[in-house]
Amino acid sequence: MFVRLRFPQTADASDLQARMIAYDPLGFLEEEHWWEVYFDRDAWERSESAFRSACERDGIAPTFEREEIAKENWNELWEQSIEPIQVSDHLFIAPSWKTVDAPSGSMIITIDPKMSFGTGYHATTRLMLRLLERHVRAGDRVLDMGTGTGVLAIAAVRLGAMLAEGLDTDEWSYDNALENAQRNGVADRVLLGQGSIENVEGTFDVILSNITKIDNLQMLPRFDVHLNPGGRIILSGFYEWDARDIHLALEQLRLHVDEEITEDEWSAIAARKEDI
């Protein structure tokens, strides 16, 4: 048997998701108002007490619903849960097993998510993609921190970037992103690795970071070091009411905010580094 745990989308969702990874989940699914994590039932029963105790020590009181799922229904349930998503007028994200009814000339990016986030279901992914459509240029070198499924790096190349480097600390994200890059025919221009900002070398024209507010604030000075003059940085993973802190940090680094967009209380910001 499997168990499905459903959590509401709250400010501590990213922290809870990161904690869950330590207990070897089978997969994640994220929607606008809730997110789910799946476990083998026996594995979760061995881990639940440790998870709750760790949360309690840190002053977190997670609430979630639990449902048991028969193993024979797992693949069907997972595939049925992933539907094509329209990101903008001309950009769609879809799994390989779904047909997309898209207008002529549309760009369809095929993402089979497995365990990774970034299917296009979450507002922050859509916000990042919309800004990327408007701010990436032909020939750009792009860095995608916390690449997950690789959807942003893949989209950057499909939109005209010369290459995109995607980094993630999780091995399962690296494997999934590599498969998706191959699936979209861009594996030669999407360079993937396992690591964090400390592993980044060189400079880029565009830096993408769809992570948490705290992580963005901590890494912004390092992002600035790796951003070319005139380069653009696109950030999300924070709520509208947290955007002020991001604005202040960008201002301190003399990064000019060009655009901010929102959806369902989430925010994304595109900023630019001055030319020398």
Image (cartoon, rainbow, N blue to C red):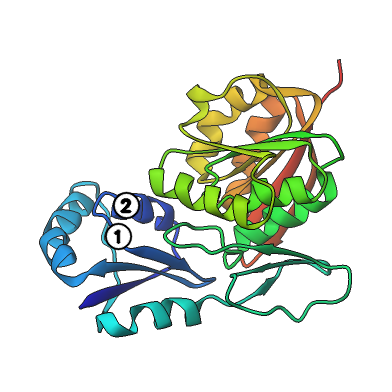
Label 2 Cα crowd, 10 Å radius (few <14 / some 14-19 / many 20+) = some
Q: Quadrant of residue 87?
A: bottom right
Q: Nearer the viewer, residue 115 or 46?
A: 115
Label 2 close to label 1 by CB (< 8 Å): yes
Could you tell me residue 23's position as x and y percent? 23, 54
144 is higher (above) or lower (below) than 78: above
| Any part of residue 69 in sight | no
Name the residue carrying label 1: 25
Q: Amino acid at mark 1?
A: Pro
The residue positioned 29% from the left and 84% from the top of the image is: 72
253 is higher (above) or lower (below) than 172: above
Name the residue carrying label 2: 21
Could you tell me residue 274's position as x and y percent? 83, 23
Q: Amino acid at mark 2?
A: Ile
Label 2: element kind: helix
Most extreme residue toward the top is 276
The quarter of the image holding the C terminus is top right
The residue positioned 33% from the left and 84% from the top of the image is: 73
